[in-house]
C-alpha cells in the first residue's frame, strides 16, 4: 500500500504530503528522501496508506493534480531492485 509520488517541489514538506493524501484515507507513513550531500529533498516521496482501497483512490485522485505548483506523478511503489553489491577491493594479493 506504498505509493511513489514524483515530480515534487523541493519546498514540499512531509506534513503537506500527509495532509494532501489524508483526503483519500489514513496515511500511515511518509518518507521524503534527501540528497546525502546537500540535505535537500530529492523531488520524490513514498507515502503509505492504511488500505489497498485508500491507495487506489489516492492514485486515481492525485495523479496529475497540482501540489506546490507541480503536477504530481503518483503510482504504486515497486520493490527496490537489487543493484548488486559490494565492490571488491581489487588488491594485488
Image: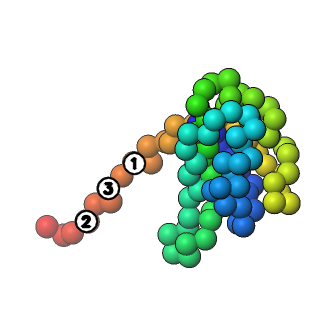
- Structural crowding at the residue carrying mark 3, measured as other residues with C-alpha within 10 Å and reported as few (<14), some (14–19) or many (≥20): few
Query: 20 or 40: nearer the eye?
Result: 20
Residue 5: horizontal and vertical position, in percent?
A: 69, 47
Residue most extreme to the top: 53
Residue ID for mark 2: 89
Query: 89 or 63: nearer the eye?
Result: 63
**Proximity of marks 1 and 3: CB atoms separated by less than 8 Å:** yes
Residue at 85% from the left image edge and 60% from the top image edge? 69
Which image quarter is the N terminus in?
top right
Residue ID for mark 1: 84
| Mark pair 1, 3: CA separation | 7 Å
Element type at mark 3? loop
Residue 76: horizontal and vertical position, in percent?
A: 65, 35
Element type at mark 2? loop
Residue most extreme to the bottom: 38
Image-quadrant location for residue 62: top right
Residue ID for mark 3: 86
Query: Along the horizontal axis of the image, is 83 left or right of 52?
Result: left
Residue 76 shows which numbered tag?
Answer: none
Query: Along the horizontal axis of the image, is 56 left or right of 87?
Result: right
- Structural crowding at the residue carrying mark 2, measured as other residues with C-alpha within 10 Å and reported as few (<14), some (14–19) or many (≥20): few
Measured along the vertical axis of the image, is residue 93 above or below residue 63?
A: below
Image-quadrant location for residue 77: top right
Residue at 55% from the left image edge and 44% from the top image edge? 29
Image-quadrant location for residue 51: top right
Element type at mark 1? loop
Colouring scheme, one of rainbow, by chain, secondary structure, one colour: rainbow
Query: Which one is in front in this view, the residue at disc 2 or the one at disc 3?
Result: 3
Regarding residue 44, the answer to whether it shows in the image is no
Amino acid at each position: 500500500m506504498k505509493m511513489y509520488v514524483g515530480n515534487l517541489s523541493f519546498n514540499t514538506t512531509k506534513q503537506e504530503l500527509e495532509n494532501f493524501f489524508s483526503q483519500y484515507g489514513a496515511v500511515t507513513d511518509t518518507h521524503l528522501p534527501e540528497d546525502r550531500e546537500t540535505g535537500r529533498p530529492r523531488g520524490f516521496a513514498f507515502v503509505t496508506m492504511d488500505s489497498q482501497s485508500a491507495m487506489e483512490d489516492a492514485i486515481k485522485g492525485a495523479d496529475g493534480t497540482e501540489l506546490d505548483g507541480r503536477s504530481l506523478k503518483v503510482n504504486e511503489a515497486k520493490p527496490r531492485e537489487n543493484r548488486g553489491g559490494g565492490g571488491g577491493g581489487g588488491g594485488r594479493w
